[in-house]
Amino acid sequence: MGSGSSKDKVEPTKNTNNGGKSGGGGGNRKPMTNTNMDIGKDGPTQVIIQTFAPAGAPAVYHGTVRARPNFQASQEAEKLHAAMDVWIGTKDNAVIDVLTSCNNEQRQLVAQAYKQKYGKDLIKVLKSELSGDYEDVVVHLVEPSAEYEAWLMNEAISGLGTEEDVLIEILSFRNKTQLEGVRKAYKNKFGKTLAEDIDSDTSGNFQKLLLKLMKEDRDEPHVVVESFAKSDARFLHQEGEDRLGTDDDFFMSVFTSRSWDQLAAACKAYEEIYGKTMEDALGKEFSGDILYGLKKLVAFSRDRAVYFADKLHEAMSGMGTDDETLQRIIITHCEVDMLEIKEAYRNKYSKTLGNMIRDDCSGNYKNILLALIN
């Protein structure tokens, strides 16, 4: 941990109208938003759906770090150079401001501009100036996202045991283009394919699940089809509890191919038809790593914001801080769905994520994490 202090921005409140569904618009009618109930999810804080979206519309997520308008990579490179070209030490506030006010794609342009202007590798310069957890966050922000995630995957595979959470989280929330980038970065960095390392480090149905997730065959977000959800629920029951033995491949196919909202609707339909949660049904049919993995996918579909809020809370609770998890979730989600994660955290733990970070971290490490979630 570092030392120092920083002021967090006020975290916005969100319209939590749970009464009606939106649709059609006009006149002086006030905008309404769909709630989690409209998309078949159970958590108390899912996302706000676009104004006047039809019932069952796919979830829309919001990052806290976005592409900076009127961005000039050369100007940002100059700011970083000035911040580190002083005798009295690095101007950390300037470094934090530059790196958290633009997205990862723009940071790559800053790194290129820095190399062109000053003939130095920006990451190497930052490493020479910074230290500790603060340095780790800064370096991972400047790295291309695919390289950082390839490193995370390798760490999860090559350490003692396998960090299933990391593998499932990354493989579940990347599109085909992003996964292809991770695969290429992995091969370039470690000399082996990601599939080869997964194959050598895992086995059985869990291995098959990860390899299916790697193919990214999940449907694009779409309006939930209730009849399709009920059909999936019946087939899952037929291939699971209603027969001797379980059709493992069918379960994995459904869980890795349905859109998240559609999978959540299938889980809800299963409970309504058979009076049992999907998690309970899975517990009777599977065990070990594959049960763990399938339950993770159910949790993602029900309310991914709550899932990641819980992970952040666990990382900062108890003795010490799980800095790797804290950094991973904030860095990989600040451009994607951090607004929803923050709201989920506040609703569940009656405390803002910003205040939790203030209490648990310090110095420039704290400051840069707060900047990323605001």
Image (cartoon, grey):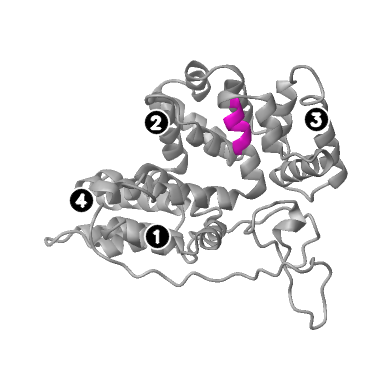
Residue 356, disc:
1
Looking at marks 2 and 4 on the same chain, the residue that comes earlier in the sequence is marked by 4
Tell me if I can see residue 119 in this picture.
Answer: no
Alpha-carbon span between mark 2 and mark 1: 27 Å
Decide whether residue 293 is among the magenta residues: yes
Q: Amino acid at mark 2?
A: Glu
Q: Nearer the viewer, mark 4 or mark 1?
A: 1
- Residue interval drawn in magenta: 290-296
Q: Quadrant of the C terminus?
A: bottom left
Q: Please, which residue is most extreme toward the right here?
A: 227
Drawn side of residue 80 relative to residue 284, left or right: left
Of residues 115 and 69, the one nearer the viewer is 69
Residue 251 rendering spot, x and y as whole percentages: 72, 28
Q: Amino acid at mark 1?
A: Met
Tell me: residue 161, above or below residue 296: above
Alpha-carbon span between mark 3 and mark 4: 58 Å
Residue 237, disc:
3
Residue 65 rendering spot, x and y as whole percentages: 48, 59
Residue 155, disc:
2
